[in-house]
Amino acid sequence: MDVLLETTFDDERDARERLEGAFRRSLGPVGVTVPRGRRVGAAFTGTRIGYARVLTVASSGLGFGRGTRMTHRHPLGAVTVALQRQGVASIAQDGRDTVLRGGQAALIDMRRPFAVRQCDDFTMNLVRLPHDVVARLGGALEDATGRVIAPGSGVGGIFVDFVARLADVCVHVSAGIGERLAGHTAELLATVLEEEYRTDGARTDAAIPRVHLVDQVLGYIDTHLGDPGLSPEAIAAQQRITVGHLHRLFDGGQGASLGRVIQQRRVDACVRELDRRAAMRPRLTDVARRWGFADTAHFTKAFAAVHGTPFRSRRARPLATG
C-alpha cells in the first residue's frame, strides 16, 4: 500500500492543500476543511485493486466533500463506500444527513454534491468503484446515499465485514486476485442496493417467494418466445425487478443461466411444432423464425448447444429447409 501522506501540519493553508492533493491522487478532486487553531496530523495510505481504489485516512476533525461547482468542473463517475473504523462522522448527500459510528458504512455518489465531517480523531476506509460497473450490475444509488449500512445481520452486514477485511488485506493480494476482489465488492454492493434500499416499487426476494417469481418469469418467457426483442431488460421491466435480481434467479450454480433457459425453451418449442406438423413438411426457416430465431443456422446452432448433437442427426421425418 502506498503512503500518500504522513505528517503533522502547523499551517492551515498548507494542511488543506496537501490533504486535497492526497485525496485527489486516490479518491478524486474534493475540497477539504481542517480544524482551526490547532496542529493537524494525518496519515493517508492507498492502493489500487483491479478497477477499485482503496484509501485509509487517519486524522482528527477533517471534513471533505464536493460542492455543486466542483461536480460540474470535475465530473467523477464513481461510487465510494465510506467505512468508519474509529470515531464519529456525519455524511450528507441527497437531502439526507446520517451519523456514522465505528463499524458503520455509507455510500457516496461522487457525481453529486456531498459532505463528510469528522468530529474528532478518526480512521476511515474509502473504497472507490466505477459508477457504471455498479449500475450495470443492477445497483440504484438514489435511495441509498446518506443512509447507514450497519454491521450485523443481513446483506448489509456481510458487505460491511467484507469491506473492512478488504481494506486490511488488499495490500497483500496479487493483481489477479485484486481484480476478482474488486468485482466481488461491486457485486456485493449491487446486492445491498437491490435488497435493502429500493423504494420505487420494485420487488425483492422478501416480497415474493423465489419459486413463485421464477414461475412468473418462465410464464412470461413462454408467451414471448417468438419475440426477437425478448431480453433480460424487457423481462425485468415486466416483472418490476432489477436485471441483476433477474439473473440471480437463474444462477443456481448448475449452468442454468437466463440466456440458456430462453434458448432451450425456444429450441423445444421448435421441435414440438416440427414433430406436430411433420406430415405437412413445414419449412424449417419459417418455424425457427416463428419462435424467435433469426434463421435456420441460428436454430441448428442453438439445437446443438442444447442437445449436444447436430440437428441433422435427429431421427425425424425429412423436413423442408428452404
Image (spheres, rainbow, N blue to C red):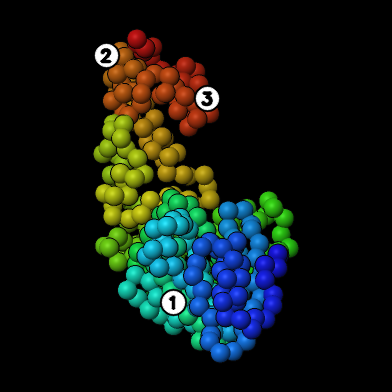
Q: Amino acid at mark 3?
A: Thr
Of callouts 1 and 2, the N-terminal one: 1
Vertical order, 304 against 263 (above or below): above
For this view, does 302 lie left or right of residue 6? left
Inspect the image, locate mark 1, and give the three-letter code of the amino acid beneath it. Ile
Would you name the residue on which mark 1 appears?
A: 91
- Please report whichever mark, 3 or 2, sits nearer to the chain's N-terminal start: 2
Residue 152 appears anywhere in the view: no
**What residue sits right under mark 2 in the picture?**
280
Q: In this rendering, is residue 227 above or below 294? A: below
In space, the residues marked 1 and 2 are separated at their CA atoms by 70 Å
Is residue 95 visible to us here?
A: yes
Residue position for label 3: 309
Q: Residues within 10 Å of mark 3 (few under 14, many from 20)?
A: few
The residue lying toward the viewer, choosing from 27 and 30, is 30
Q: Residue at x 56, y 63 (%)?
A: 24
Viewer-proximal residue among 47 and 32: 32
Type of amino acid under label 2: Met
- In which quarter of the view is residue 162 placed? bottom right
Q: In the picture provided, is 62 more to the left or to the right than 236?
A: right
The residue shown at (42%, 44%) is: 258
**Apparent side of residue 55 relative to residue 68 in the rendered image (left or right):** right
- Determine the CA span between mark 3 and mark 1: 59 Å
Q: Are marks 1 and 2 in contact (CB under 8 Å)?
A: no
Rendered-image quadrant of the C terminus? top left
